[in-house]
Image (cartoon, rainbow, N blue to C red):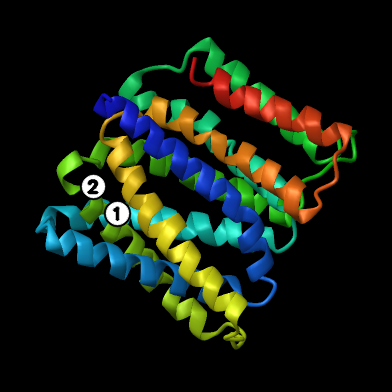
Amino acid sequence: MKRHHLAALALLATAGAWGATFVLVKSVIQRIAPEPFIFWRFTLAGAILCVFAAMRGRFTRALLRPGITLGLLVFFGYWAQTRGLLTISPSRSALLTGIYVVLVPFFQWRTSGRPKPAAWLAALLALAGTWVFIGGGFEARLTFGDLLTLGGAVLFALHVVLSARWSKHETATALAAVQVLFVGLAAGPLAIFAKPTPWDFRVVAAIVFTAVVTTALAFAALMWGQAHVTATEAAVILSFEPVAAALVSIAFYGEPLTAAFFIGAALIVGAMVLSQV
């Protein structure tokens, strides 16, 4: 199988894993505050990635600047997304987060030229989908959780664009290690002031699972995959994330199936695909 196809599969697996995790994170942050959860999840994942990167001898000083920059985007993006999840459903969070796919072509304006007409239409579709999704009508309004989630989407779009620029096959694991560990360290000061963490089995299992599977493995796959596909290709593949999240949320979280949900979701997912045409 060609490396390009393997990279696409790696990104698809990453999107599926991240999407399926929305319900888990929604459940665990009812017991542990977002800040200590992010701290333990990313610090553990960063330590794992650092061990593998060190074994391969891939660390260089040149990785610090891009790693810390990407880490800042991930930290504030995940903090906003996780805080937003306290007040909105997993599928709503995932679909609003997925709007970052529509934003990628606009953030590439400087390097790739003016966005195509399809990108502008996709942006309008995404706005329409969001409007329907939050209830429609003249009184429809975004909640604070929605705004936090959309803010995270902006940061994730920047992350996709910059990752495509800085990711290289040889240093993918090391770059993932630097940014993931930075996220954990950045969350540390905030975690100190959070409410005490109940160290029961559910909390520990959730931290270990998200650290190993959906952070360490996922970010390594993301950096490696983006070294072999364009930012546009990566964005459209990663648009599977909200689809996976919605399916898992409906199956395991009891997400209600309403006409607004289906229409809004269809418009947003359609915008994601159209933005990459």
Residue at point 69%, 41% (across, down)? 247
Q: Position of residue 175 (x, y in %)?
A: 24, 53
Relative to 234, is 158 above or below? below
Identify whether 19 is placed above or below 183: above
Point out residue 35 in the picture as x, y percentages from the top left corner.
Answer: 53, 73
Gap between marks 2 and 1, in whole Å?
A: 6 Å
Q: Position of residue 104 (x, y in %)?
A: 46, 31
Q: Which residue is mark 1?
A: 176
Q: Quadrant of residue 189?
A: bottom left
Residue bearing the label numbered 2: 172
Name the kind of residue labelled 1 in the image. Answer: Ala
Height in image: 190 above or below 198?
above
Q: Residue at x 29, y 26 (%)?
A: 4
Along the line of sight, the residue nearer the viewer: 166 or 7: 7
Exactly how many numbered labels are in the figure?
A: 2
Disc 2 + disc 1, Cβ < 8 Å: yes
